Image (cartoon, rainbow, N blue to C red):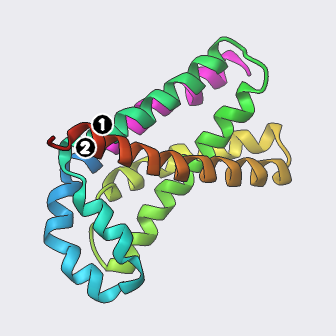
Amino acid sequence: MSPLSVLILVLPLPLAFLLHDAEEVAVQHRWMENHSGALRERFPRLRPLLDRLQRLNTKAFALAALEEFIVLLCATACVLADVPFSLELWAALFLAFSLHLLLHLGQAVAVRGYVPGLVTSILLSPFAAYGIFCISLVMSPLKMFALAVTGAAFLALNLLFAHWLGLKLTSRR
């Protein structure tokens, strides 16, 4: 990976993640308290997810975000150390993060209003689009698709673990 790519894409990704998750941490719990009833009515199939998200207080959500941030920092460190396959690992996480931003935009359309993470998703969309463009210059569409699916699956599983960890570390004994 070129030094310019590292400066423009690799190093800013953890900062973009921090910015995005700071918005989510700041508003997620209160937003869920205010909107969970209406969401349960409109989207009954999402009830288990909504129940889990409502159980996450701000501290638990912040701990979950911290765990995810550590994973991202490890991937970034691998790129900086030029570890074999680190570009693929990083690209998988970048593509999954970009899909996550799109998910927030879709959620906002579905609920017809603000959702936690929407503002930073809009602000970070040009960064995500540029990153996807740059990745497309060095990887085939099929490889990008495979990495996006792999990254999204990993992040989904890791998110379940991170939420479990956040709840476990903040539950009262």
Q: Amino acid at mark 1?
A: Leu
Residue 47 on image: x %, y %:
34, 77
| Side (left or right) of 112 relative to 91 | left
Q: Residues within 10 Å of mark 1 (few under 14, many from 20)?
A: many
Q: Secondary structure at mark 1?
A: helix
In the image shown, does 130 or 66 lie closer to the viewer? 66
Quadrant of the snapshot with the C terminus:
top left
Per the rendered image, the range of residues in magenta is 1-22
The residue under the point 78% across, 52% down is 146
The numbered dot on residue 63 is: 1
Q: Residue furthest front?
A: 173
- Viewer can see residue 124: yes
Residue 92 on image: x %, y %:
67, 42
The residue under the point 81% across, 37% down is 138
Kindly report the secondary structure that dominates the magenta region of the rendered protein: helix
Inspect the magenta stretch and tell me whether residue 13 lies in it: yes
Q: Marks 1 and 2: in contact by CB < 8 Å? A: yes
Q: Secondary structure at mark 2?
A: helix
Residue 104 on image: x %, y %:
42, 62
